[in-house]
Amino acid sequence: MKNRRGLLIILSSPSGAGKSTLTRRLRDWDPTIRFSVSATTRKPRPGEVDGKDYHFMSEEAFKRDVAEGDMLEHAHVFGNFYGSPRRPVERAIEAGEDVLFDIDWQGAQQIRNSALAPHTLSIFLLPPSITELHRRLVSRGQDSPEVIAKRMQKSWDEISHWGSYDYVLINDDLEKTDTDLKGIVTATRLRRIQQPMLLDHVRQLQAEFEEMQS
């Protein structure tokens, strides 16, 4: 076990705010940070591997896990259930491993209400402007104007929950945002609650001090 507990890192943003790029940079900076593997009731797509891409479950098993508190967060999307199994994350945190979650505000809220809240770091990415967000979505060249309009509405719904996160970064300068993100992770790893070995160290200091006084 490392000399610290792991972090449950939540990174949320509207589509087009640069989350994928910053996530990739964060994991390049520290490859030990791993993604949480979600559970889902949808059928595997060609090439997907159970336990690597998703934990594929029956709807009955998924609902049982939810009822028994074994999902940190869950949602029903387009006819299928998705969620984050609790036990693998707990084991990772106790082993000093950081787990990264790419989830929306609803999933983030569920995790903040869970028993793992003290070890959770939540970060929200804001775009520099709505105009720039729209430009980024259009420049992808993947969606029709109708789809882009729906994405913009969903993005604004997501942005409206920025105030519930621990940290909020305006991604108007990728290099600066990247540096700030890494700084936040580094500092949060040093929170007292993340360092269970501190108590033993202070006790050792106390024993040394008392020995010197005797």
Image (cartoon, rainbow, N blue to C red):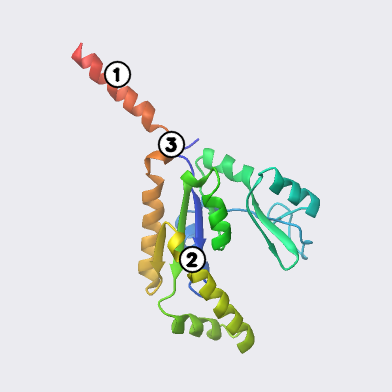
Q: Mark 3 or mark 1, which has the lower sequence index?
A: 3
Residue at the bottom extreme? 145
Residue type at numbered disc 2: His
Q: Which residue is drawn at 36% across and 61% down?
A: 180
**Left or right: 190 in relation to 210:** right
Q: In which quarter of the image is residue 183?
A: bottom left
Q: Residue at x 38, y 43 (%)?
A: 191
Q: How far apart are marks 3 and 1 (CA)?
A: 21 Å
Residue on which disc 1 sits: 207
Q: How many labels does the image show?
A: 3
Residue on which disc 2 sits: 161
Residue type at numbered disc 3: Asn
Look at discs 3 and 1 and give the one toward the viewer. 1
Return the residue nearer the eye: 21 or 123: 123
Residue on which disc 3 sits: 3
x, y percent for residue 184: 38, 55
Q: Mark 2 or mark 3, which has the lower sequence index?
A: 3
Q: Quadrant of residue 138?
A: bottom right
Above or below, comparing residue 8 to residue 76 in the picture: above
Q: Is residue 171 visible?
A: yes
Look at discs 2 and 1 and give the one toward the viewer. 2
